[in-house]
Image (cartoon, rainbow, N blue to C red):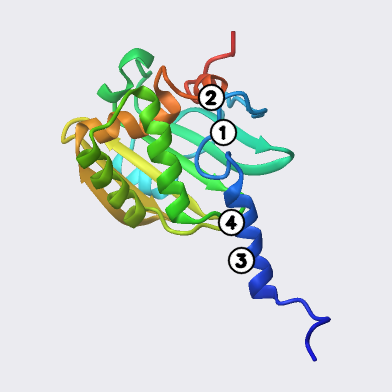
Amino acid sequence: MNKGRSNPVRGRRDCMVRVAALPVAMLVLPQGSTAQTAQATPGGGEQPPDEVRRRRPAARLSGRGTLRFLGLHIYDALLWVENAIDSGNFVAHPLALELRYARSLYGSMIAERSLREMERAGPIPAIQSERWLAFMREAFPDVGAGDRITGLWNPADEMSEFVINGKAGKALRDRAFGERFFGIWLGNSTSEPALRQALLGRKAP
C-alpha cells in the first residue's frame, strides 16, 4: 500500500551513504579534485567560537576555506591562532581548527578518511594506526548540516582535543597524532595545498 510513498528516514540515510561515498566527503578532498577556497582577511571581525575563546582568549582568525566538490558544499574550515604560525613547524603552536559542516557524513568514515590522509606524511606502524583509528571513531560522531567539530592542539601538553557543537568530547595526549592529524590541513604533505594557504592567511602562489 505504501509503495508509492517515499520514506523520509530512508531517504536521509541513503543521502548520507551517497555523499559519504564521495572521495571528498570525509575531511579533505583528494589530490587533483576541484576544491574552491575562499580566503578570509585576518582580523576581519569574525569572533572565535566559545570553545576556542575559553581556552585561548587571545585567539584570532588566521584564515578560512570553503570546500566544494561537484558543486556540493562540504564544509567551511577556519583556523584560529594566537600568533602567526611557522608553517614549517605548525605543531609548535597552539591552534584550533574549526570545521562547519554543510551536509550529512558518517563519523566512522570521517575517521577512516582521516587516517588515510594522515598516512600521506609517511607510513604509520600498524599498532599505532589501529589505536588512532579507534580513538577517532569514538571522537567523531555522525554530522549533519550546521554541525561543528573543533579540533584543538596544545603543544605544551601534546594534547589533541575535539569539541562537538561546543561540547567537550574526546582528547588524546600524543604528539605524533597531533602532528599527523592537523597536518591533514597544515602539513607540507597535505592533499590540498590551496586550502592550506587559505587557512594560513596567505594568497595562493
Marks 3 and 2 in Cβ contact (< 8 Å): no
Q: Is residue 1 left or right of residue 10?
A: right
Q: Does label 4 or label 2 sit earlier along the sequence?
A: 4
> If you read the primary sequence from the N terminus, does the residue marked by circle 1 or circle 3 appear first?
3
The mark closer to the camera, 3 or 4, is 3
Callouts 3 and 4 close, C-beta under 8 Å: no
Kindly report the distance in space between the C-alpha atoms of the residues bearing marks 3 and 4: 9 Å
Q: CA distance from mark 1 to mark 3?
A: 22 Å
Q: Is residue 94 left or right of residue 16?
A: left
Residue 83, by quadrant, is top left
- The tag earlier along the polypeptide, 3 or 4, is 3
Instruction: Identify the residue position indicated by label 4 in the image.
Output: 104
Going by the numbered disc 1, the residue's amino acid type is Leu
In the rendered image, which residue does mark 2 sit on?
A: 192
> Mark 3, residues whose alpha carbon is within 10 Å: few (<14), some, or many (≥20)?
some
Q: Are marks 1 and 3 in contact (CB under 8 Å)?
A: no
Classify 162 as above or below 158: below
- Residue plotted at (27% across, 40% down): 129
For the residue carrying disc 1, how many other residues have a C-alpha within 10 Å: few (<14), some (14-19), or many (20+)?
many
**Label 3 belongs to which residue?**
13
Residue lying furthest right in this view?
A: 4
Q: Secondary structure at mark 1?
A: loop
